[in-house]
Amino acid sequence: MHRHIIKHCRACGTSVELRVPDDGDTRERAVCPACGTIHYVNPLLVVGTVPYLGDQVLLCKRAIEPRYGKWTLPAGFMELGETMAQGAARETAEEAGAEVEMGAFFSAMSIPRVGQVHVFYLARLLRERFDPGHESLEARLFTEHDLPWDELAFTTVRETLKCFFADRRLGQFGVHDVDIT
Ligand code: ZN
């Protein structure tokens, strides 16, 4: 993921060097040879919901890269100043234009390969009317059986949906911690 590559110091603009800082650190960091700033890069949090209505879930067809045209749950990068649940609700409003009642924390999916954690909350749809934003081509409801399993945008979405329908069959929603390796 090129998102993690830092070329220039954020403080002074000098080209950075990749080395282990002398302060007892054990990992290579982008260190500025001019002002000494160490640029730490840590995993990013993606927050989203599983909006559901009875036995159906709401998916959005992506209008943006990556995975243009593939289906996803509403989710996006958490912003500063918000809680996970607030971020998940915001993304649901932005991407699906859906009115929901936020429910329980449902899944956390670690993806060390790309340095991300994706978390999803259950969200009960309050009405069957959606207004997809500019990041979505379409938003619609699917049952487990008509869901486009082969056209999903992300592994974390597929795993979360599998957990959702399995829990629904059991009649009880749990909390799922899954490592995508
Ligand atoms: Zn610098």
Image (spheres, rainbow, N blue to C red):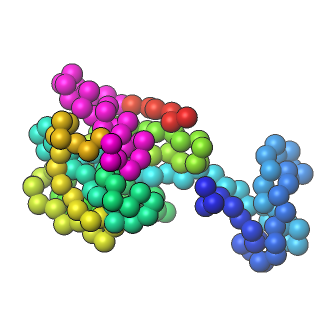
In magenta segment, residue 74: no
At horizontal 46% and vertical 32% (from top left) the residue drawn is 178
In magenta segment, residue 159: yes
Left or right of residue 151, residue 126 in this image:
left
Q: Position of residue 97 (x, y in %)?
A: 22, 64
Position of residue 146 relative to residue 92, above or below, is above
Residue farthest along the front direction in this orientation? 150
Q: Position of residue 83 (x, y in %)?
A: 41, 54
Q: Position of residue 160 (x, y in %)?
A: 35, 38
Position of residue 106 relative to residue 126, above or below, is above
Q: Is residue 105 visible?
A: no
Q: Is residue 140 visible?
A: yes
At horizontal 82% and vertical 72% (from top left) the residue drawn is 15
Which quarter of the rendered picture does the N terminus lie within?
A: bottom right
Position of residue 87 relative to residue 180, above or below, is below
Q: Main secondary structure of the magenta part?
A: helix
Front one among 137 and 85:
137
Left or right of residue 107, residue 111 in this image:
right
Left or right of residue 111, residue 30 in this image:
right
Which quarter of the rendered picture does the C terminus lie within?
A: top right
Residue 6 figure quarter: bottom right
At horizontal 24% and vertical 32% (from top left) the residue drawn is 165
Left or right of residue 44, residue 9 in this image:
right
Position of residue 100 relative to residue 144, above or below, is below
Q: Position of residue 96 (x, y in %)?
A: 24, 61
Number of numbered discs visible in the structure rendering: 0
At horizontal 59% and vertical 48% (from top left) the residue drawn is 115
State which region is magenta: 150-175
Front one among 68 and 132:
68
